[in-house]
Image: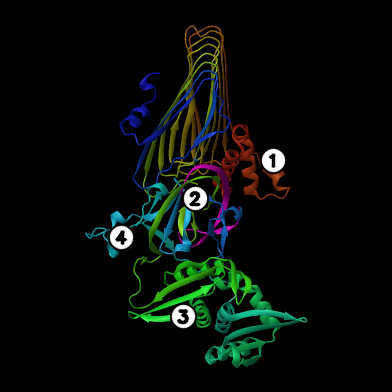
Amino acid sequence: MPAGDNKFSALNTAVWSGGSFIYVPPGVHVDIPLQAYFRINTENMGQFERTLIIADEGSYVHYIEGCLPAGELVTTAEGDLRPIESIRVGDHVMGHDGRPHRVTAVQMRDLNGELFSFTPMSPANKFSVTSEHPLLVVPRDEVRVMRKERNGWKSEVNSAKLRATEPRWIAAKDVAEGDFLIYPKPKPIPHPTVLPLEFARLAGYYLAEGHACLTNNCESLIFSFHSDEFEYVEEVQQACKSLYETPGSVFYEKSKHSARVTVYTKAGYAAMRHHIGSGSANKKLSDTLMRQDETFLRELIDAYVNGDGNVIERGGALWKRVHTTSRVWAFQLQSILARLGHYATVELRRPGGPGVILDRNIMRKDIYQVQWTEGGRGPKQARDCGDYFAVPIKKRSVREAHEPVYNLDVEAPDSYLAYGFAVHNCTAPIYKSDSLHSAVVEIIVKPHARVRYTTIQNWSNNVYNLVTKRARAEAGATMEWVDGNIGSKVTMKYPAVWMTGEHAKGEVLSVAFAGEDQHQDTGAKMLHLAPHTSSNIVSKSVARGGGRTSYRGLVQVNKGAHGSKSSVKCDALLVDTVSRSDTYPYVDIREDDVTMGHEATVSKVSENQLFYLMSRGMTEDEAMAMVVRGFVEPIAKELPMEYALELNRLIELQMEGAVG
């Protein structure tokens, strides 16, 4: 193939930043699709990649261009932390902007590679990700001052510069110890139910010292204090009197130095179980409590510290520390404190397991310590940067892993929180300025070998995506390009097959979706250079919101390539009246004995189709999305199931708001 076959290849060759080489030996069939994943992780950036695949005689390979291990905790909209594998489509998780966002897809794959673990200044927040998973980071090298590392201490940083530096997405493998992870402060989302401060105070004491008791169908709340804690006993009684019209009774047991408050209240029993739960290890705040205002939350935490914490004054600051057996509550407390302007560390102080107390065998529960400072000169390793805390990485480790890993796709801003820290989801980042992606893919298919190369492209809408794809198919070989183009500002991509051997086959299956301010200029090149070669091009495009799609294709049959066959089918679907579709076919036949067919159609969504689907209970948006999915189904069915689902999901997202 001549070097000048595509003008973009010269651009790629000038500046090359990465790529891959794959060789498949003779007769080897690689049944599991090979996968690559590309992303631009900074603004004003160009990415230049090159891929070379050689499939030797009689071999087969499928190459596909695109996470957290099970058990990693993701912060939900309610402030709860749930294992990533338990998250479902439709759930809402916290993004790096501190607000809840809907999960649109959940992905799982088997990992055979490296897992990177990061321990921030809060040991229990340690999390693990795959090597390419982007984290929101401020590199220490960009904000450090003159003092170098010494005595185990990292180089010092300029706090003002750190606060002024915009965090950026960086692949996990490129994040180092000492770099700053981002812990977002949750944004207040008021709940329609506003609870009184007396409830906050009672809830805090219940978290620390209370339990709900049901005896002989009689509901009660019981709080246990030291016999000297008269003030806390009185606060509980006053709150119960205000809320439930009874202060309850107090029983002092001198031998145990204890004071027990018992309040018989059906309403209080139900409220505490509903909003906090029962059992020390299972207590957590309900969504209603998590969404109360800062005054309420501060009152709740003050009461909780009274009952279950200790306070030390040091350096003009109040150092506060509490212990709990509830992991969820420990991380909820960390989240609430961040909202109140305090970064708290969480540490597993004593793992659970068998133990002995007074010759009795017991089963200990995990104990979590949460610690923070208020006022004065507390620890400054974590910097308050306004909307988030910049938290240094204390330890980074790598291990080989052979296990399932999970990822979430989340609505904009395309991120979620792993143990409270910002990680990106599985779509490409979005930046305000334009970026460039230039790629060259070259494939050599030896006699009687078969290669399928699949791309699902979802670059953000500021990326110029300029790609050269070309393959040489020798005698009896088959080359298949499967191409899905959803994202980018402009895509120019024309996969080519040079059929140089007799009975070689080439196929391009392409789907393009263009929305507002997008131009998908795609197509194919089929060059028949030997007898009895065959090619097939199927191109489908959808345009909406003023988007533009173009098919640009070449079929060339050289002299001597007798008995060759080629079929071209181009279908375009216009969703509205402001979008555009163009077809630019070019056919160059230099041999008499050739079979050639070309078909092109442009259509609009039928009102009858929409009416039928809407009469079956669908909304107009849902009906329109189903019509579009049906239109691209011939391409989607050629993909592995998880990629077909991803393609359909991306189309659904693009179609949202398409009507009206």
* Quadrant assignment for the N terminus: top left
Rendered location of residue 17, percent (x, y): 35, 36
Rendered location of residue 344, percent (x, y): 44, 69
Give the mark nearest the N terminus, 2 or 4: 4
Q: Are marks 3 and 1 in contact (CB under 8 Å)?
A: no
Q: Which residue is mark 4?
A: 152
Image position of 387 (left or right of 596): left
Question: 422 above or below 285?
Answer: above
Foreground of the two, 227 or 466:
227
Foreground of the two, 271 or 214:
214
Q: CA distance from mark 3 to mark 2?
A: 39 Å
Question: Do we see residue 118 in this rendering?
Answer: yes
Q: Secondary structure at mark 4?
A: loop
Instruction: Tell me the amino acid under the disc marked 2.
Output: Asn
Foreground of the two, 251 or 608:
251
Question: 130 above or below 270?
Answer: above
Q: CA distance from mark 4 to mark 3?
A: 30 Å
The residue shown at (36%, 21%) is: 3
Badge nearest the viewer, 4 or 1: 4
Q: Start and end of the magenta stretch?
A: 89-115
Badge nearest the viewer, 3 or 2: 3
Instruction: Tell me the amino acid under the disc marked 3.
Output: Asn
Give the mark nearest the N terminus, 3 or 2: 3
On residue 425, which mark appears?
2
On residue 310, which mark appears?
3
Badge nearest the viewer, 2 or 1: 2
